[in-house]
Image (cartoon, coloured by chain):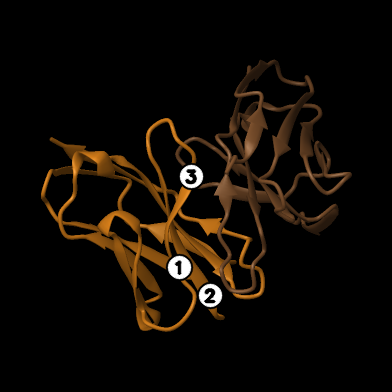
Chain colours: A orange, B brown
């Protein structure tokens, strides 16, 4: 069965620190990969996505993620976090045939201390 | 543009009672999804509609859960009878189903507590 694993449940960083959130997926075929973010009190929203092409994708608010096919990974990075990045981050994967059927990881709560 | 609307925002019921959630997707979005998010877990797809037809309901517990989207616009998800393990946030999402640019827009969800 397809699955997504996020390595960290809870991450605490100080402002200006660098961020890397790990995500690994289990699926044998071609996939599309996503990172969604949920800010406190808000709904889930798309941060970035990978469908094909350059494995390094850039999203909103300075976030980027790198797809490494050989490692089945899609890690999220940001060079310098801000207090406003405090949120829950979800990695998700879909098989190419049904790009709406998201399979989510369990989420990582990021707390950024001012 | 207006987002995905869901109601109610919160619902508390006792086990074995029934409950219904409503969702109005973004205007013009053909695809509608219901996800269940249990505390501490990521959302899990329950059912996916394309217009008023079901695309995928493989993870919907059909003995107690039902969903409909009769006119291809808004949708209702029902649980009857509810169990304690149904306590979760029920998220509705919609998408325009573009060819290579699938992006889901989520509503704020309905938080269900089953006592």
Q: Is residue A34 above or below residue B15?
A: below
Quarter that holds the C terminus of chain B: top right
Instruction: Give x and y (percent) for residue B31.
Output: 72, 56
Q: What residue is disc 1 on?
A: A25
- Are circles 2 and 3 on residues that touch, CB within 8 Å? no
User: Few, some or many C-alpha atoms within 10 Å of disc 2 (few <14, some 14-19, many ≥20)?
Assistant: many
- Are circles 2 and 1 on residues that touch, CB within 8 Å? yes
Left or right: residue B24 compared with residue A23: right
* In front: label 3 or label 1: 3
Mark carried by residue A44: 3
Mark carried by residue A31: 2
Residue A27 seen by the camera: no
Instruction: Give x and y (percent) for residue B54.
Output: 82, 56
Left or right: residue B7 compared with residue A26: right
User: Few, some or many C-alpha atoms within 10 Å of disc 1 (few <14, some 14-19, many ≥20)?
Assistant: many
* First-in-chain label (2 vs 3): 2
Distance from disc 2 to disc 3, alpha carbons, whole Å, reads 21 Å
Instruction: Give x and y (percent) for residue A31.
Output: 53, 75
Identify the secondary structure beneath mark 1: strand
* First-in-chain label (3 vs 1): 1
Residue sitting at x 47%, y 48%: A45
Distance from disc 3 to disc 1, alpha carbons, whole Å, reads 20 Å
Residue sitting at x 74%, y 48%: B60
The residue marked by circle 3 belongs to what chain?
A
Same chain for labels 3 and 1? Say yes or no.
Answer: yes
């Amino acid at each position: 069965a397809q699955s997504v694993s996020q390595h960290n449940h809870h991450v605490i960083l100080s402002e200006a620190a660098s961020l890397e959130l790990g995500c690994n997926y289990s699926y044998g075929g071609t996939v599309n990969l996503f990172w969604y973010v949920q800010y406190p009190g808000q709904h889930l929203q798309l941060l970035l996505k990978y469908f094909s092409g350059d494995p390094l994708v850039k999203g909103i608010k300075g976030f980027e993620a790198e797809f490494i096919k050989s490692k089945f990974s899609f890690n999220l990075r940001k060079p310098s976090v801000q207090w406003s990045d405090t949120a829950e981050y979800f990695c998700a994967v879909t098989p190419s045939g049904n790009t709406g059927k998201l399979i989510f990881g369990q989420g990582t709560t990021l707390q950024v201390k001012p | 543009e207006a987002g995905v609307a869901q109601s109610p925002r919160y619902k508390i019921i006792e086990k074995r009672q029934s409950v219904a959630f409503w969702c109005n997707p973004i205007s013009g979005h053909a695809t509608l999804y219901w996800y269940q998010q249990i505390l501490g877990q990521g959302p899990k797809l329950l059912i996916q509609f394309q217009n008023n037809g079901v695309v995928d309901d493989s993870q919907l517990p059909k003995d107690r859960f039902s969903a409909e989207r009769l006119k291809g616009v808004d949708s209702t998800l029902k649980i009857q009878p509810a169990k304690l393990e149904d306590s979760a946030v029920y998220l509705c999402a919609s998408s325009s189903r573009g060819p290579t640019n699938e992006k889901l827009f989520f509503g704020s969800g309905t938080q269900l507590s089953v006592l």
